[in-house]
Image (tube, helix red, strand yellow):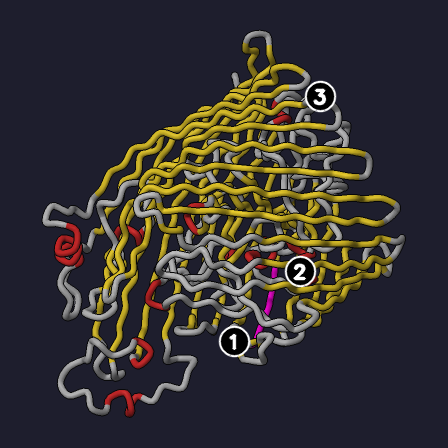
Amino acid sequence: MTLSLVNFPFRARRLSSPVSASRGRLPMAIAAAMASSGTLPVYADTDTTNVLPLISIEAQAPMASPVHDVHAGHAKGDMDLGEQLREVNGVSGSRLGSHGVSAIFRAQGGERLIQEVDGASLYPACPGGMDTTLGYATAGSQSDLTLYKGAQTVSRGPNFAAGSIEVTRHTPSRTDDDGVQGTLGAGWRSNDDATSETLSLTAKQGDFWAALDFEHSERNNYEDGNGDTQSGGYRSDNGSVRVGAFATEDVAIEAGVAVVRIDDALYPSMDAPRSDMDRQYLKLTTDNVGLFSHTETQLNHARVVHDMDNVTLRDFDDSSMSMGMGSGMDMDMDMSDMAMFSSATTETWYASTQGDIPLTVGGHDAILTLGADAERLESNSNSRMGMSLDSLSDSQTWPDVVRTRGGVFAELDTTLDADNRLVTGARYDVSISDARDADEVVGSNASAISAWRAQYGDDVEAKQRDGEFSALARLEHRVNEAVKGYAAFSRSVRFPTASERYYNRQSDSDGWLGNPELDPEVHQQLELGVAVRQGAWRYSADTYYNRVHDWIELAKGDSLTTYDNVEAELYGIELEASWQQNGWQHSAGVAATHGTNLSDGTPLSQVAPFNGYLATRYDADRWWAGARFDAAARQSRISDSEDATAGFGIVGLEGGYRVTDDIELSAGISNLFDKAYAYHVNRFYDDPLQGDVQVNEPGRIFWTHASWSF
């Protein structure tokens, strides 16, 4: 896997104004990232566009984006994008199976992180978090996986406190040569006998272009370091077709469709025989239209269908389950004794438009970006369960939930002088949510609204409207040629999810109810960072303090799981250092996060322990070799709903040989000493009915990969 920060041109949106080139969709924070054993977060000089300077007096990017080369990630065997992100300093991830590792950064994951595919929101369908946004991102070798750490812009949405994750695909430019180019790759890894094949093609002729991405992958269950079998098998096929045209010198049009089919995915308690995603989008970019030097407008639609059960892919003895039941269901019986089926869908419509206006403010060059975005989500989930396949009881766990959000924003990017840059922005968002079937009686349950009122009060209403203001002020300062820093203060907002507000599982023993009257989370955050360059050495430090009003906390009781707003705080630090010279690259990083529920003084859940890495790599003309050590401390500062997690340290080796400029072979060993370990973060917050499930990571893995570019 490669996280390219140097010698890898970043792929921001095309901007016609030389001043606006300092902004676009580029990160405006110290880029703190580290991926494979060989790629270092180096802060380079300011005279090229593939560097990490904070300030560029030539109006180039102030910071290079931490860009993940997804194709290289496949080479290592990390077929899931969430797995790849875990090699970025400070990023953890919860595993349930082998598909859909959920990234968590600064103790925030899911909808607390902005997650975009091709510049648009994409939401999963499982109420319990079995599937993830990144699990439906069609990747391929023409893709970049990018993490923007911290509050950097208000243009991507209101929930920007922790950062944003983007999967973007490369598109040809007007100046590219005509012809066909592509990449073909294949990989294998032991332990789960996983295979992957990828094909990416791009063709350009004159003002027209087309691109094709296809990927097939399969995994079986794997063994952890104890030799125990863990559920993780699945089969995945995904592909996309994109077409584009440069209609005029200043107008470009792009359209595409993407399809993902994930079959027979195995997990500890329930499996997912079917997870389908279909997405379509249309994008229009223009230059030099009236006051605007550049504009982008897009429409996006996605539909995700997710089926899960504990029968189809397992041996289920219906006769033994039926014995002794009598005339009714024993509600105190463990869920694992039941037959369970669930089918969920989430449909997302997304639209956005934004444009850049070059200005002079107080004698300083500036770019004013104006924009608006809107999204509508429709989520439904129906379940059936019982002690016999002939006596299943129906329920509607997402009672036709509709969430609509719209926002407008303005952001001013001002170059104060050669050493200072100021970014200020504000946005206002309105969110309207409702459960349209809240009054419906399904099966033997009461209506959802009756259950919510019984728990939270007789005046509870399903329909909710929230309006919130977000803002950002960020100053970047160059002390001298060797030292650069930044300070940022922000107010951001996170609206409740469908499960947090409207989940409806009624049970005398293991109920789970959303809270329609939850308030949105309000994050007030201060960030400070510094980057130092001294000869072959590079150092960086990022710190943050996040005071959260109305943090949405899950509370699991003896027989009922609920949600409530609490006061909370999060703070932490991420440190990295690297050295690069004469073909050698060495790097190290550590990250610490602290989270507290201030309402009762207890620790927040899902906070990763102190963790870090050491890495080294040597590059020769035709070959390279590297090693990496990842470690995490024991996590004993836990919430009441969690168990302590043991620390771990694992070693990986890898190397490669470039047969020609177009053909590369690589191989390696992950978890060299076959250690048994698990990340502290887990799926409890997404699905409390599974309990505090910590799934062990795979044991020793041998992997190989071959790629051909043409």
Residue 461, position as x, y percentages in the image: 16, 46
- Dominant secondary structure of the magenta stretch? strand
Q: Residues within 10 Å of mark 3 (few under 14, many from 20)?
A: some
Q: State the mark number for residue 401.
A: none
Q: Which residue is mark 2?
A: 199
Measure the alpha-carbon separation of dots 3 and 1.
Answer: 53 Å
**Mark 2 residue type:** Leu
Quarter in which the N terminus is drawn: bottom right
Please state which of the two labelled residues, at mark 2 or mark 3, is closer to the viewer.
3
In the image: residue 574, left or right of residue 586 = left
Residue 349, position as x, y percentages in the image: 38, 45
Q: Are marks 1 and 2 in contact (CB under 8 Å)?
A: no
Q: Which residue is mark 3?
A: 58
Please state which of the two labelled residues, at mark 1 or mark 2, is closer to the viewer.
1
Viewer-nearest residue: 257 or 414: 414
Q: Secondary structure at mark 2?
A: strand
Magenta stretch in the rendered image = 214-220
**Mark 1 residue type:** Gln
Indicate which disc, 1 or 2, sits on the residue closer to the N terminus.
2
In the image: residue 15, left or right of residue 683 = right
Q: Which residue is mark 1?
A: 230
Q: Secondary structure at mark 1?
A: strand
